Image (cartoon, coloured by chain):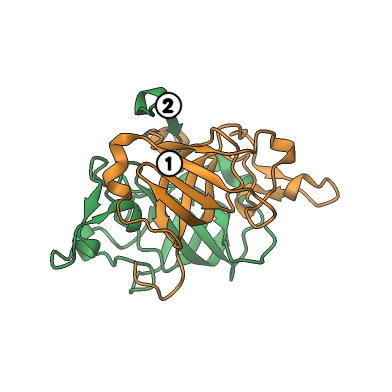
Chain colours: A orange, B green
Protein backbone atom coordinates (compact mmCIF):
# COMPACT_ATOMS: atom_id res chain seq x y z
CA UNK A 1 0.00 0.00 0.00
CA UNK A 2 1.48 3.35 -0.98
CA UNK A 3 2.04 5.94 1.68
CA UNK A 4 -0.30 8.91 1.64
CA UNK A 5 1.12 12.39 1.28
CA UNK A 6 -0.77 15.63 1.26
CA UNK A 7 0.97 16.57 -1.99
CA UNK A 8 -1.03 13.97 -3.89
CA UNK A 9 -4.26 15.89 -3.32
CA UNK A 10 -5.38 18.87 -5.35
CA UNK A 11 -6.58 21.88 -3.42
CA UNK A 12 -10.12 23.17 -3.93
CA UNK A 13 -11.28 26.77 -3.93
CA UNK A 14 -14.14 27.69 -1.64
CA UNK A 15 -16.26 30.55 -2.89
CA UNK A 16 -18.23 32.10 -0.03
CA UNK A 17 -21.94 32.51 -0.82
CA UNK A 18 -22.53 35.16 1.84
CA UNK A 19 -21.59 36.32 5.29
CA UNK A 20 -22.85 36.53 8.85
CA UNK A 21 -24.15 39.86 10.11
CA UNK A 22 -24.04 39.72 13.92
CA UNK A 23 -23.57 41.78 17.06
CA UNK A 24 -20.74 39.36 17.94
CA UNK A 25 -17.46 41.07 17.16
CA UNK A 26 -15.09 39.86 19.86
CA UNK A 27 -13.88 36.24 19.65
CA UNK A 28 -13.15 36.17 23.38
CA UNK A 29 -16.73 37.15 24.25
CA UNK A 30 -18.46 34.85 21.77
CA UNK A 31 -20.27 31.78 23.12
CA UNK A 32 -18.65 28.45 22.23
CA UNK A 33 -21.91 26.97 21.00
CA UNK A 34 -25.11 28.40 19.58
CA UNK A 35 -27.25 27.23 22.49
CA UNK A 36 -25.08 29.11 24.98
CA UNK A 37 -26.52 32.57 24.49
CA UNK A 38 -25.78 33.44 20.88
CA UNK A 39 -27.76 36.42 19.59
CA UNK A 40 -29.99 36.52 16.58
CA UNK A 41 -27.98 37.07 13.42
CA UNK A 42 -28.59 37.59 9.73
CA UNK A 43 -27.19 35.50 6.90
CA UNK A 44 -26.62 37.85 3.97
CA UNK A 45 -26.24 35.95 0.71
CA UNK A 46 -24.79 37.07 -2.60
CA UNK A 47 -27.49 37.64 -5.23
CA UNK A 48 -26.04 34.94 -7.49
CA UNK A 49 -27.31 32.17 -5.16
CA UNK A 50 -30.78 33.56 -4.43
CA UNK A 51 -32.52 30.86 -6.45
CA UNK A 52 -30.98 28.22 -4.18
CA UNK A 53 -32.62 29.81 -1.12
CA UNK A 54 -36.18 29.73 -2.41
CA UNK A 55 -37.40 26.80 -0.32
CA UNK A 56 -36.04 27.97 3.03
CA UNK A 57 -38.91 28.82 5.38
CA UNK A 58 -39.26 30.46 8.80
CA UNK A 59 -39.45 27.89 11.57
CA UNK A 60 -37.15 25.38 9.87
CA UNK A 61 -33.93 24.22 11.48
CA UNK A 62 -31.01 24.13 9.07
CA UNK A 63 -27.28 23.53 9.15
CA UNK A 64 -25.14 26.51 8.20
CA UNK A 65 -21.58 25.86 7.11
CA UNK A 66 -19.13 28.72 7.55
CA UNK A 67 -15.42 29.35 7.08
CA UNK A 68 -13.86 30.17 10.44
CA UNK A 69 -11.38 32.53 8.85
CA UNK A 70 -9.58 33.32 12.09
CA UNK A 71 -8.80 29.64 12.76
CA UNK A 72 -5.19 28.47 12.96
CA UNK A 73 -4.86 25.77 10.31
CA UNK A 74 -1.65 24.32 11.73
CA UNK A 75 -3.16 23.25 15.06
CA UNK A 76 -3.85 19.51 15.59
CA UNK A 77 -4.51 19.36 19.35
CA UNK A 78 -6.21 21.80 21.73
CA UNK A 79 -7.42 22.12 25.28
CA UNK A 80 -11.22 21.78 24.82
CA UNK A 81 -13.03 25.10 25.14
CA UNK A 82 -9.69 26.80 25.81
CA UNK A 83 -9.67 25.33 29.34
CA UNK A 84 -6.05 24.51 30.13
CA UNK A 85 -7.08 22.21 32.99
CA UNK A 86 -8.50 19.85 30.36
CA UNK A 87 -6.10 17.52 28.55
CA UNK A 88 -4.85 18.25 25.06
CA UNK A 89 -7.29 16.66 22.63
CA UNK A 90 -6.98 15.91 18.93
CA UNK A 91 -8.86 18.61 17.00
CA UNK A 92 -10.97 16.04 15.16
CA UNK A 93 -12.57 15.18 18.50
CA UNK A 94 -13.38 18.83 19.22
CA UNK A 95 -15.30 21.73 17.70
CA UNK A 96 -12.27 24.02 17.86
CA UNK A 97 -12.02 26.65 15.10
CA UNK A 98 -8.31 25.80 14.97
CA UNK A 99 -8.05 22.84 12.55
CA UNK A 100 -6.64 22.13 9.06
CA UNK A 101 -9.87 23.10 7.27
CA UNK A 102 -11.71 25.44 9.64
CA UNK A 103 -15.25 24.76 8.47
CA UNK A 104 -17.85 25.79 11.03
CA UNK A 105 -21.06 23.77 11.38
CA UNK A 106 -23.99 25.48 13.06
CA UNK A 107 -27.54 24.28 13.64
CA UNK A 108 -29.82 27.33 13.58
CA UNK A 109 -33.53 28.09 13.37
CA UNK A 110 -34.77 30.32 10.57
CA UNK A 111 -36.74 33.27 11.91
CA UNK A 112 -37.51 35.14 8.70
CA UNK A 113 -36.58 35.24 5.05
CA UNK A 114 -36.34 38.48 3.06
CA UNK A 115 -34.83 37.78 -0.35
CA UNK A 116 -31.14 37.13 0.22
CA UNK A 117 -31.32 38.09 3.92
CA UNK A 118 -32.21 35.28 6.32
CA UNK A 119 -32.62 36.01 10.01
CA UNK A 120 -31.63 33.12 12.31
CA UNK A 121 -31.50 32.28 16.01
CA UNK A 122 -28.62 30.65 17.89
CA UNK A 123 -25.71 31.35 15.57
CA UNK A 124 -22.44 31.68 17.49
CA UNK A 125 -20.43 32.98 14.51
CA UNK A 126 -18.68 36.35 14.55
CA UNK A 127 -19.79 39.27 12.39
CA UNK A 128 -18.28 38.94 8.92
CA UNK A 129 -17.81 35.17 9.02
CA UNK A 130 -18.05 33.82 5.44
CA UNK A 131 -20.97 31.46 4.74
CA UNK A 132 -20.25 28.41 2.55
CA UNK A 133 -23.42 26.34 2.45
CA UNK A 134 -26.84 25.68 3.97
CA UNK A 135 -28.22 22.14 4.34
CA UNK A 136 -31.24 20.40 5.85
CA UNK A 137 -30.59 18.99 9.32
CA UNK A 138 -29.27 15.44 9.60
CA UNK A 139 -31.93 14.01 11.91
CA UNK A 140 -31.95 10.23 11.52
CA UNK A 141 -34.97 8.91 9.69
CA UNK A 142 -35.79 12.20 8.01
CA UNK A 143 -35.94 12.01 4.28
CA UNK A 144 -33.61 14.61 2.88
CA UNK B 1 -27.13 49.04 2.87
CA UNK B 2 -24.57 48.12 0.25
CA UNK B 3 -25.39 45.44 -2.26
CA UNK B 4 -23.55 42.16 -1.82
CA UNK B 5 -21.47 40.80 -4.66
CA UNK B 6 -19.50 37.60 -4.73
CA UNK B 7 -16.43 39.56 -5.85
CA UNK B 8 -16.12 41.15 -2.43
CA UNK B 9 -15.25 37.80 -0.85
CA UNK B 10 -11.82 36.21 -0.92
CA UNK B 11 -11.66 32.57 -1.90
CA UNK B 12 -10.21 30.03 0.51
CA UNK B 13 -8.12 26.98 -0.33
CA UNK B 14 -9.28 23.65 1.02
CA UNK B 15 -6.47 21.20 1.64
CA UNK B 16 -7.82 17.65 1.82
CA UNK B 17 -6.61 15.73 4.87
CA UNK B 18 -7.31 12.29 3.40
CA UNK B 19 -9.61 10.31 1.17
CA UNK B 20 -12.34 7.70 1.23
CA UNK B 21 -11.43 4.14 0.33
CA UNK B 22 -14.68 2.37 -0.61
CA UNK B 23 -16.18 -0.31 -2.80
CA UNK B 24 -18.50 2.41 -4.16
CA UNK B 25 -17.21 3.48 -7.56
CA UNK B 26 -20.33 4.22 -9.56
CA UNK B 27 -22.24 7.42 -8.70
CA UNK B 28 -25.45 5.99 -10.18
CA UNK B 29 -25.31 2.94 -7.91
CA UNK B 30 -24.36 4.79 -4.72
CA UNK B 31 -27.01 5.14 -2.02
CA UNK B 32 -28.26 8.69 -1.46
CA UNK B 33 -27.74 8.52 2.29
CA UNK B 34 -25.50 6.50 4.55
CA UNK B 35 -28.36 4.65 6.21
CA UNK B 36 -29.59 3.33 2.87
CA UNK B 37 -27.16 0.47 2.46
CA UNK B 38 -23.75 2.12 2.26
CA UNK B 39 -20.87 -0.32 2.73
CA UNK B 40 -18.12 -0.12 5.27
CA UNK B 41 -15.37 2.22 4.11
CA UNK B 42 -11.97 3.37 5.25
CA UNK B 43 -10.90 6.96 5.83
CA UNK B 44 -7.23 7.18 4.90
CA UNK B 45 -5.61 10.30 6.34
CA UNK B 46 -2.37 11.99 5.39
CA UNK B 47 0.37 11.44 8.00
CA UNK B 48 0.62 15.19 8.70
CA UNK B 49 -2.74 15.17 10.55
CA UNK B 50 -2.27 11.96 12.55
CA UNK B 51 -1.92 13.82 15.84
CA UNK B 52 -5.40 15.29 15.35
CA UNK B 53 -6.92 11.79 15.15
CA UNK B 54 -5.57 10.52 18.45
CA UNK B 55 -8.81 10.76 20.43
CA UNK B 56 -11.07 9.05 17.89
CA UNK B 57 -12.29 5.73 19.27
CA UNK B 58 -14.18 2.71 17.91
CA UNK B 59 -17.89 2.94 18.68
CA UNK B 60 -18.06 6.72 18.44
CA UNK B 61 -20.33 8.47 15.96
CA UNK B 62 -18.63 11.35 14.17
CA UNK B 63 -19.37 13.76 11.36
CA UNK B 64 -17.13 13.44 8.33
CA UNK B 65 -16.89 16.39 5.95
CA UNK B 66 -15.91 15.61 2.38
CA UNK B 67 -15.49 17.46 -0.89
CA UNK B 68 -17.97 16.10 -3.42
CA UNK B 69 -15.56 16.70 -6.27
CA UNK B 70 -17.97 15.53 -8.95
CA UNK B 71 -20.61 18.07 -7.92
CA UNK B 72 -21.75 20.74 -10.38
CA UNK B 73 -21.07 24.06 -8.65
CA UNK B 74 -23.34 26.09 -10.93
CA UNK B 75 -26.56 24.28 -9.96
CA UNK B 76 -29.00 26.13 -7.65
CA UNK B 77 -32.14 23.99 -7.94
CA UNK B 78 -32.61 20.24 -8.33
CA UNK B 79 -35.28 17.56 -8.34
CA UNK B 80 -34.75 15.94 -4.92
CA UNK B 81 -33.01 12.56 -5.13
CA UNK B 82 -32.93 12.92 -8.91
CA UNK B 83 -36.67 12.13 -9.06
CA UNK B 84 -38.12 14.29 -11.83
CA UNK B 85 -41.66 13.82 -10.54
CA UNK B 86 -40.64 15.94 -7.54
CA UNK B 87 -40.64 19.70 -7.94
CA UNK B 88 -37.45 21.67 -8.49
CA UNK B 89 -36.11 22.62 -5.07
CA UNK B 90 -33.48 25.14 -4.06
CA UNK B 91 -30.23 23.27 -3.39
CA UNK B 92 -29.90 24.74 0.10
CA UNK B 93 -33.03 22.76 1.05
CA UNK B 94 -31.54 19.50 -0.27
CA UNK B 95 -28.50 17.27 0.24
CA UNK B 96 -27.65 17.35 -3.48
CA UNK B 97 -23.92 17.12 -4.31
CA UNK B 98 -24.62 19.80 -6.93
CA UNK B 99 -24.26 23.13 -5.09
CA UNK B 100 -21.88 26.12 -5.04
CA UNK B 101 -19.56 24.60 -2.42
CA UNK B 102 -20.10 20.83 -2.63
CA UNK B 103 -19.19 19.92 0.93
CA UNK B 104 -20.54 16.52 1.94
CA UNK B 105 -21.65 15.92 5.53
CA UNK B 106 -21.84 12.32 6.71
CA UNK B 107 -22.65 10.86 10.10
CA UNK B 108 -20.72 7.62 10.48
CA UNK B 109 -19.80 5.16 13.23
CA UNK B 110 -16.13 4.40 13.82
CA UNK B 111 -15.45 0.66 13.64
CA UNK B 112 -11.69 0.60 14.14
CA UNK B 113 -8.69 2.89 14.20
CA UNK B 114 -5.27 1.86 12.88
CA UNK B 115 -2.95 4.88 12.82
CA UNK B 116 -4.13 7.04 9.93
CA UNK B 117 -6.66 4.45 8.69
CA UNK B 118 -10.11 4.64 10.24
CA UNK B 119 -12.74 2.07 9.33
CA UNK B 120 -16.32 3.40 9.39
CA UNK B 121 -19.86 2.17 8.79
CA UNK B 122 -22.58 3.90 6.77
CA UNK B 123 -20.51 6.22 4.58
CA UNK B 124 -22.21 6.81 1.23
CA UNK B 125 -19.20 8.56 -0.38
CA UNK B 126 -17.53 7.24 -3.52
CA UNK B 127 -14.03 5.77 -3.52
CA UNK B 128 -11.47 8.56 -3.78
CA UNK B 129 -13.68 11.29 -2.30
CA UNK B 130 -11.43 13.86 -0.54
CA UNK B 131 -11.90 14.16 3.23
CA UNK B 132 -11.83 17.69 4.70
CA UNK B 133 -12.60 17.39 8.39
CA UNK B 134 -13.94 15.18 11.19
CA UNK B 135 -16.08 16.59 14.00
CA UNK B 136 -18.01 15.33 17.01
CA UNK B 137 -21.72 14.88 16.34
CA UNK B 138 -24.03 17.83 16.95
CA UNK B 139 -26.48 16.16 19.34
CA UNK B 140 -28.22 18.87 21.37
CA UNK B 141 -27.17 18.98 24.99
CA UNK B 142 -23.86 17.23 24.43
CA UNK B 143 -20.87 19.18 25.60
CA UNK B 144 -18.39 19.42 22.78
The residue at the point 45 percent across, 53 percent down is A112
Locate the C terminus of chain A and report the quarter of the image it occupies. bottom left
Give the CA distance from mark 2 to mark 1. 11 Å
Q: Chain of mark 2?
A: B
Is the Cβ of the residue at disc 2 closer than 8 Å to that at disc 1?
no
The residue nearer to you, when weighing B79 against A3, is B79
Rendered view: A117 above or below B24: above
The spot of residue B89 in percent (x, y) is: 25, 57
Within-10-Å neighbours for mark 2: few <14, some 14–19, many 20+: some
Within-10-Å neighbours for mark 1: few <14, some 14–19, many 20+: many
The residue nearer to you, when weighing B96 against B1, is B1
Query: Farthest residue toward the right?
Result: A85
The residue nearer to you, when weighing B91 against B98, is B91
- Residues at discs 2 and 1 both on one chain: no
Kindly identify which numbered label has been placed on residue A132.
1
Rendered view: A115 above or below B80: above
The spot of residue B41 in percent (x, y) is: 41, 63
* Occupied quadrant, residue B137: bottom right
Q: Chain of mark 1?
A: A
Q: Is residue B130 visible?
A: no
The residue at the point 23 percent across, 51 percent down is B77
Query: Farthest residue toward the left?
Result: B84
Task: Kindly identify which residue carries mark 2.
Answer: B9
Amino acid sequence: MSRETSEQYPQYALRPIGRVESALHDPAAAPKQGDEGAPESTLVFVPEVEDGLRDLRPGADVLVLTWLHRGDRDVLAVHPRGDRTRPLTGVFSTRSPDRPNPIGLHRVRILSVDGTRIRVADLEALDGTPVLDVKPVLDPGTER
